[in-house]
Amino acid sequence: MAFELTNHTSKPVTAREKDSSGDSLSPTDTQKDTRFAYIDNQPYEIREGETQLQFIRRNLGQDIVPTLCDAPNLEPFGSCRVCSVDVALQENGAVRTQASCHTPVAPNSYLYPNSDRIQKLRKNIIELVLTDHPLDCLTCEVNNNCELQTVAAKVGVRDVRYPAGKNHLDRKKDLSHPYMTSDMSKCINCSRCVRACDEVQGQFVLSMAGRGFDAHIVKGANQNFFESDCVSCGACAQACPTSAISDVFESKSIANTEKTRTICTYCGVGCNLEVATVNGKVKSIQAPYDAAVNEGHTCLKGRFAFGFYNHPDRLRTPLIRRNGELQPATWDEAYDYIANELTRIKKEHGPDFIAGISSARCTNEENYLMQKFIRAVIGTNNIDSCARVCHSPTALGMQRTFGTGAATNSIIDLKYTDLIMVIGANPTEGHPVTGAKLKQFAMKKPAIVIDPRRTEMARYAKYHLQLRPGTNVALLNMMLYYIIQEGLEDKKFIENRTEGYEEFRQKILALNIDEAEKVTGVNRELVRKAAIAYASAPNAMSFHGLGVTEHTLGTFTVMQIADLAMITGNIGRRGVGVNPLRGQNNVQGAADMGCQPHQGAGYLDVTDPENHKKYEAFYSAKLPDYVGYKIPQMYQAALNDKLKALWLMGEDVVQTDPNTHHVKAALAKLDLIVVQEIFMTETAKLAHVVLPAASFLEKSGTFTNGERRIQRVQQVTEPLEGTKPDGQIMIDIMNRMGYAQKPYHPDWLLAEISQIVPFFAGVKWNELGDNGKQWPVAQDGSDTEILHTDSFKRGKGKFIAAEWRETPEILKNGQEFPYIITTNRELEHYNNGTMTRRTGNVKILTEDVLLLHPDDAARHDIKSGDMVCVISARGKVDIKARVTDEVKPGVMSSTFHFPEIAMNNITSSECDTDALCPEYKVVACTIRKSKGKYKEEQK
Amino acid sequence: MSAETTHSQIAFPQETLAEVNRILGLFPEDNKKSALLRVLHIAQAEFGWLDVPVMDYVARLLHINPVEVYEVATFYSMYDTKPVGKVKLEVCRTGPCMIEGAEKIVKYIEDKLGIKDGETTADGVFTLKTVECLGACGYAPMLQAGEQFHEHLTEEKVDALIEKYRANPRANYMGM
């Protein structure tokens, strides 16, 4: 800064005659008052920490000062100088020019944002920029929506006075990537893309190389987008003020003016999206800056992977299996077939021979309808959802300790916390937007990562506890042990808010540390340091994922995480809590709506006589008062001839549930399989009736994200011809079977849900607004950011100790199959991949691969790219190897996004002891180089 | 960064690594980036020039992102991100030298050696590079060769120094 502004100038008090405006104060009031600064000699109150630009824009509007390098979601930078203003120490005094975007507004300073001098300066800056910018606006994709163009028009540039000199107009376009594009001849070196890459995503791909005239944006080491480490989040394209960086959908084109705000269909983060349509077709997607959840950011799935929605493979007509083949049918034929079969099975065997699995991909309203159909129309509690195979242990474990099975805090709390602990989660791949925020956090403040893999988070974490898969309980016991041993418990919190501590403490202190260190493979000193860090941080937040739940002791691990929060008093205020990273877009909602065999809508126990009476009266139907089948029990029942029909709404159990052979054998026993789907999945191929459903872009409803935020999904386009929203299908079949329902609309459905789900009491479709509401929502519509602030849902928090046991998978098969394979996710694909494999994402990541350690690879003479045969007690798969030290020796890792590999052929049927969540994370296996037909694939 | 990162064979010899670690020890645990300039000089001395795998190696040593090395290495003219000859003729191109005829000197060297700014002679002896101020404005125009300044340059002086280095490329290192 050229000079410093001070407020001790001895200027004479100048009387001001024209002071008629109401919000202006007279000079005598404000003269020495440090709360004020002046814009064009009018006083305005300053806010703490405000920049000159924010001060001017807040008081006089957005358009007073033009900017180029400034962006709403980036730190002030001050490189373009277009935002310059004149600043004086006294009224009409001598001025200096300062870049307002990064200069704090000083008390008693006089700002002149549009003096003649400043206007000339801005014009000259833009002229200089234009000497090295192609003037092909008419053919440029961002014509009329270009910030440079807007500013040039605003400052009044018509001709550039400077003669043409050296320039960069011959730079080539980069079209290497399926989504990202760049044309650096249009770059104005504002660094917005670099800062978006650093500050928003934290990928550090883009940078400014060279200096002076040679300064230019590089991707990695002068690579193109495709070769670089770019994760295609699109933050740079959205940040770029011109079309120097853009995307293949031309999302900044003025053609994309018709926009609908909706919620992403992929993960549980729940990003808000702005979907642009042209003539009813989706053209591009951007992330709104005012979205509470994603604040102008989203990932390559949310932003770019929408091409599946009108893909030729979409199912467009109902199919009925005739003579062993799925053949096209009308909706009426399909409904009649289903109604007849269900009626027959119900009559011959009873309602409990029918079961339903709902979908966490569908809306709350659709999930509510599905469980209502199964309970009220069929008359059984055999309803479950895919929460079973992901976070059921979280719900159960947190219900037992806290009373509510949902995230206690919100993602915004990252701004208030001092330490994060990430357990069994790989958020930068699985929950990219929250992952980016966690990564940003870990770069600045301490993070603890507990994960068998050196994930991206682990690389940034201060403490990485790289344990052997299946030993979470032993490791967390070590942490609890050291917290107690060091005397770091929050005694006041324990005393006032919890119960069962003394017994718990005794059990923890009895821990055999030697054994725990040995089984986890994590140095005890490192664990001690991490435990001390967690316990002594003023506010510590924990996050966990499927690496916690998908184990035989998943529920116990969740309870230990709750124990850790309680013992350190990290519950019930900003910046703390236990925060499961819910997997699917609406997995929270599916459970909330009662798609569980033991709890109805709103988590009320179905066996409780009072609840039972309430539900029967509400649905006007006779309901069973005993618990139904969980998903794994459904397969067992089918194999034992106790189940005859299964209805699946958007769930591909054949590809995604573990131990595929077992699942297929169970399905083969059924008389009726109904599948509602958007694509012909592996499960749909086995169905008797397939009903073509509409995607998230073609229907309305609500999704509830991982922080309990109920957000509006708004229909963007008409359902593809021949398809219907899942909710409408549900309603059709209910009507067909004699249970009258109005046509599908979230408005009346939410009104009904709010009467039976206590924490939805004040939820109304028209009042959810752009950013939704976090449940519990009271009758008056007020919502809740933080749970358990004064007391726990269950009264006092309950300490429950857990004892580590080896999983039966290792005990039974560990000798013969000495390696452990653990399953994970890749950023580019989502779950079974039916959607992402039908988008450009498949060009970025084309197959599942097996990660294995160099030592293990050397032992079997395997190189990266070789085909490897992985064998478990259930079966074998052939998969391409990637040799990496991200995993420890003896541990391997892979994904199940591609049906060609079908990784679940080798996973086991072992389950969490309490919640029956399958153990995807520990599979005993052995490896060898592939033989036969797979051997050739390595080329 | 996996162990499989290409060029994993790139590594400082034991002795150099010890020196690098000593330098790293001077900075706080979580801010090794501060040592970047010094470590890059050592890397350049060791490997001749800063190839991408060399820069990636430095990034790993300092626990920073590779691009943070690239941006620094490309910013300073003292770092070579392309192969260079045994003798680097770094001609100052900043204001005072320019006024005193640096452009003419550059042109003369270009013509004499048959190379352009930034290029290396076919025999791999000379690289010509124009650089920012070397702090010898009083002796303009000037160039630096290795560790030596050559000042008040004239065409004759350029002839002589080129002769000298052609005969002995190591002559540009004082006391060596």
Image: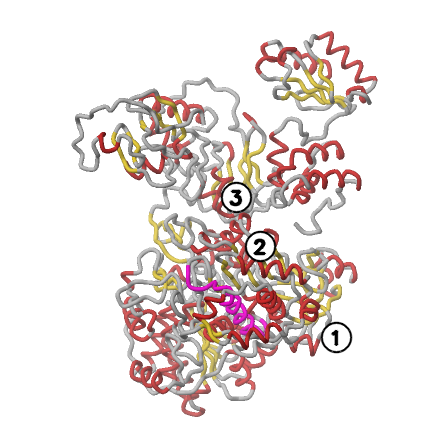
Dot 3 falls on which chain? A
Q: Decide if residue A690 is in sight here.
A: no
Residue closest to the far bottom: A348
Q: Which mark is residue A457?
A: 2
Are dots 2 and 1 in contact, CB under 8 Å? Answer: no
Q: Tell me the SS state at disc 1.
A: loop
Q: In this view, does A355 lie to the left or right of B111?
A: left
Dot 2 falls on which chain? A
Give the mark, 3 or 2, whose residue is nearer the N terminus: 3
Nearest to the observer: residue A325 or residue A930: A930
> What is the x, y in percent for residue A912?
56, 76
Identify the residue shown where x is 38% and y is 63%.
A721
Q: Which mark is residue A800?
A: none
**Relative to residue B115, is residue A900 depicted above or below?**
below
Which label lies toward us, 3 or 1? 3
Nearest to the observer: residue A880 or residue B164: B164
Give the mark, 3 or 1, whose residue is nearer the N terminus: 3
Q: How far apart are marks 3 and 1 (CA)?
A: 47 Å
> What is the x, y in percent for residue A561?
53, 67
**Quadrant in which residue A854 is drawn:** bottom right
Dot 1 falls on which chain? A
The residue under label 3 is: A198
Give the mark, 2 or 1, whose residue is nearer the N terminus: 2
Q: How far apart are marks 2 and 1 (CA)?
A: 33 Å
Same-chain check, marks 2 and 1: yes
Residue extent of the magenta highlight: A551-573
